[in-house]
Amino acid sequence: MLPDLVDKPLALLFLQDAATRTYGHTLLFSIALCLAGLAFLLASGRTYGLALAGGSLGHLALDAMWALPHVLYWPLLGGGFPRVHEDISFLEMVWWALNDPVRVAGDMLGLLALALVVAWVVAEKGIKRLQRDARHRAVTTENEPV
Ligand SMILES: [Zn+2]
């Protein structure tokens, strides 16, 4: 969902009736996420960044971005982003997108993936806290006078 979370507010706030698939839907954005995810993995040993980058690449596939090469390969094929629907407003475009079952299914998969990542992070933190508390209890019990 990250590409949409980047591009939709941009379109709403700054681009108005222009394209809703811009910077977040480029291969450059996903490559940058992969590099950032690798750096995060090397620095912390955690794979969250790579999971985010993989989700972003999956989003580009679900959005069939190969059909919009000027967006996918931006800026290699030119500087601008093509408008998808020049004759309708942003809100009309959102309504149109919500009525496309393939697009809605892709977004639902994205929401599910996001929920799984959040659940994974929360579960990992919970497990680490339980392990830390168990170690603390074990040390405290060892030091108690008999
Ligand atoms: Zn998208």
Image (cartoon, helix red, strand yellow):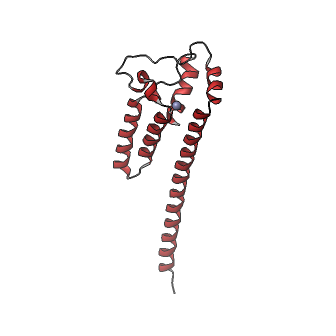
Q: Position of residue 119 (x, y in %)?
A: 56, 52
Above or below, 46 against 72 in this view is below
Above or below, 103 against 143 in this view is above
Measuring 38% from the left and 30% from the top, which residue is drawn there?
28
Q: Which of 95/11 is in front?
A: 95
**Residue 109 lies in quadrant:** top right
Side (left or right) of 50 relative to 96? left
Measuring 57% from the left and 37% from the top, which residue is drawn there?
107
Measuring 43% from the left and 16% from the top, which residue is drawn there?
80
Side (left or right) of 24 relative to 110? left
Q: Position of residue 138 (x, y in %)?
A: 49, 75
Number of numbered discs overlaid on the protein picture? 0
- Looking at the image, the residue that sits furthest to the bottom is 146
Q: Which of 140/126 is in front?
A: 126
Q: Position of residue 54 (x, y in %)?
A: 43, 42
Q: Position of residue 39 (x, y in %)?
A: 35, 43
Q: Which of 64/94 is in front?
A: 64
- Looking at the image, the residue that sits furthest to the top is 87
Side (left or right) of 73 relative to 112? left
Above or below, 125 against 2 in this view is below
